[in-house]
Each structure stands twice: as C-alpha cells, then as structure tokens.
Image: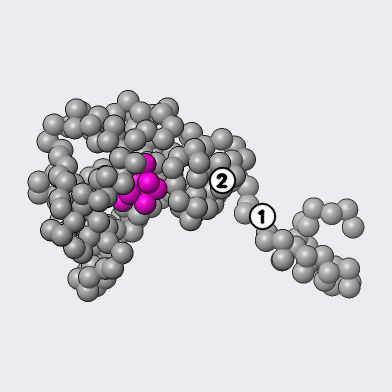
Amino acid sequence: MHKTDEELEDIARTFLRKVGLEYQIKPDMMTIISKLKHVDPGFGYRRVPDEEMPDAEAQWYSDDIEISMRESVFVAMQRGEPRARMTVSHELSHYLLKHKGHLNRSPVKSAVEVSVKRIVSQESEARRLAPRILAPEHLIPEGASVEDIKTMFGLSHEAAVIRKEEIEATRRRRRGEKRPLPQSIIDYLKEAKRRGYPVRTDLGDDT
C-alpha cells in the first residue's frame, strides 16, 4: 500500500528515536549503523571491494538482514559525502520498510528492476524515505532555505531542493493551506484582471 509523506516522516522519526538520535542534527552514518546494530543485533553490514560489486553502490539482503556497500562508498560515507550518505540511508530504508528480496541502489537499473512492479515500488518507497532519515521534518526550521538544509543535514543541492518542497507541502497540509500559485501565473492573472477579465482567484492585491 502506498505510504503518505506523513507516514514516511513518522517512520523516519520513530527510527531515529529508537536509536537515540531523534534530536541529533547530521549524525554520521556509522553512528546510525552502530546504534541500529545495538538495538537489533540481527542487523548487519558488510564492506565489499568495489570490483566485487560492479553494478551497485550498495545492496540490501532481506534474508540476511544485511547491507553490503562498496569499499569506496563506505570510505565516502565516513568522509560525510552527500551521495554516500544518501546511498546508505536508502538501503537502511529497505530495512525499515521491511522490504523483501535483494535490492540495490545503482545508477543504472537492470531490466528486472525496471519491469518488476514490486521492486519498482520498493525502490520508490526507499527513495522517498531515505532523505527523511537524513533530514527529518521536525528538525528543519521554519523558513529554512535550500542552502540551510543542504549544509545542516549533509545533502546534495538537488536533494535539499526536493526536501524543502516536501517539507513545505507537509506543513501546508498540516495548516490547511493551499499551495501558492507560481509567480508567473499570478502575473498572468493580474494582467487579465487589469484588462477587465473576471478573475475570482485571490491575488493578494487590493485592486
């Protein structure tokens, strides 16, 4: 069943609370993994030489309850590089969502991954949850800019842009507000109104 944004936010926050990091801004990924292993001894991770994992940056094995990651990804994660942090968070998301199978984060998807509906759905769900683990909504200040989110939580610029949009949408729903119109639409409607066309949309002006 498709999970709402609010449900994913709750999953991320519950997990962070479980490992004692609910109010920690930008914990390093090794700390998250270590704390998870402490609360769930059955969970494991494995570092793999890059040449032994040519088609994926990291993988989730549900049968073994284990994440495998390329050595280069592990090293980059330890350095706090945004892509590596997101890669590991993506695989942790499969664990939290109880996804079954052998799943991986790869820049190139195999034919099976593209065609199998269950795998496509699971990858999409993990892709939505991963940034919420790294930058949970409850820790993002009201009015935070893309640059604020990028810097505070160690995200790439692209991920920070998406996260800001998600946060703003979640908070609008909570307040019962509608999404504001793009400025280009507002300008178009104002010009139509100026020309005498009936415009019922509130444009925030006094004319």
Which mark's residue is nearer the viewer, 2 or 1? 2
Q: Quadrant of residue 202?
A: bottom right
Q: Residues within 10 Å of mark 1 (few under 14, many from 20)?
A: few
Residue 26 drawn at (x, y percent): 41, 35
| Magenta stretch encompasses residue 88 | yes
What residue lies at 29% left-to-right and 29% top-to-bottom?
19
What residue lies at 27% left-to-right and 45% top-to-bottom?
75
- The three-letter amino acid code for the residue at tag 1 is Pro
As drawn, the residue found furthest toward the top would be 20
Q: Which residue in the structure is indicated by mark 1?
A: 180
The segment highlighted magenta reads: 80-90
Q: Is residue 67 positioned above or below 110 on the image?
A: above
Q: Earlier in the sequence, mark 2 or mark 1?
A: 2
Rounded to the nearest whole Å, what is the CA distance between mark 2 and mark 1? 21 Å
- The three-letter amino acid code for the residue at tag 2 is Glu
Labels 2 & 1 near each other (Cβ < 8 A): no
Determine the secondary structure under disc 1: loop
Residue 23 drawn at (x, y percent): 42, 27
Q: Which residue in the structure is indicated by mark 2?
A: 147
Residue toward you, 21 or 57: 57
Determine the secondary structure under disc 2: helix
Residue 59 drawn at (x, y percent): 20, 53
